[in-house]
Image (cartoon, grey):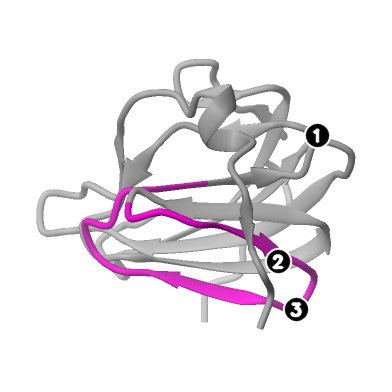
């Protein structure tokens, strides 16, 4: 068993990867024992990731607030606490908070054989962010 104390500091998400104010608390960084990477990410209202993809996919577990997630194939989906979203390997997507609510999620992804967990792309435009939402099922 490996136990890690809460010694890390909350980081502010870099403007190269995020729009708005985003706070990131690292949970786990891939290493020689496990390829799993994990972070608790908190988005202020209107904040969101840039478009990006993961070589081994990504799982999001929403812990608080109301958020949005979308893929290049279309459709912005609302996400709420308890929702789990799996994004396929290589699928370009973004996620973040709604314009008027905070949102937090735990993001889990696996590193590939080169240690890569994410490839960042272009920023989400306001038109993409404000696109019509897909109804919740």
Q: Residue at x 21, y 56 (%)?
A: 90
For the magenta stretch, what is the residue range?
73-94
Q: Nearer the viewer, residue 123 or 125?
A: 125
59 over 43 or under it: above or below = below
Element class at badge 2: strand
Q: Hey, which residue is sitting farthest front in the picture?
A: 132
Q: Hey, which residue is sitting farthest top in the picture?
A: 15
Query: Which numbered marker is on residue 82?
Result: 3
Picture quadrant of residue 18:
top right
Query: Which numbered marker is on residue 62?
Result: 2
Query: Is residue 109 in sight in this rendering?
Result: yes
Dot 2 alpha-carbon crowd within 10 angstroms: few under 14, some 14 to 19, many 20 or more: many
Query: Is residue 5 in sight in this rendering?
Result: no
In percent of width and height, residue 100 lies at: 89, 38
Q: Earlier in the sequence, mark 1 or mark 3?
A: 1
The reply to whether dot 1 and dot 3 touch (C-beta < 8 Å) is no
Q: Nearer the viewer, residue 46 or 28?
A: 46
Query: Which numbered marker is on residue 44?
Result: 1
C-alpha span from label 1 to label 2: 14 Å
Asked if residue 113 lies in the magenta stretch, the reply is no
Q: Earlier in the sequence, mark 2 or mark 3?
A: 2
Q: How many marks?
A: 3
Answer left or right for 36 relative to 125.
Answer: left
Q: Earlier in the sequence, mark 1 or mark 2?
A: 1
Element class at badge 1: loop
Q: Residue at x 52, y 82 (%)?
A: 1
């Amino acid at each position: 068993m490996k136990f890690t104390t809460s010694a890390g500091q909350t980081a502010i998400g870099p403007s190269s990867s995020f729009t708005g104010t985003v706070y990131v608390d690292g949970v786990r960084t891939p290493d020689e024992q496990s390829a799993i990477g994990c972070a608790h990410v908190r988005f202020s209202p209107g904040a969101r990731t840039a478009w990006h993809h993961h070589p081994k996919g990504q799982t999001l577990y929403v812990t608080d607030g109301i958020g949005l997630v979308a893929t290049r194939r279309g459709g912005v989906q609302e996400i709420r606490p308890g929702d789990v979203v799996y994004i396929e390997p290589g699928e370009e997507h973004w996620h973040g908070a709604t314009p008027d609510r905070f949102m937090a999620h735990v993001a889990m992804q696996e590193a590939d054989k080169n240690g890569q967990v994410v490839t960042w792309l272009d920023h989400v435009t306001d038109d993409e962010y404000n696109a019509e939402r897909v109804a919740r099922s």
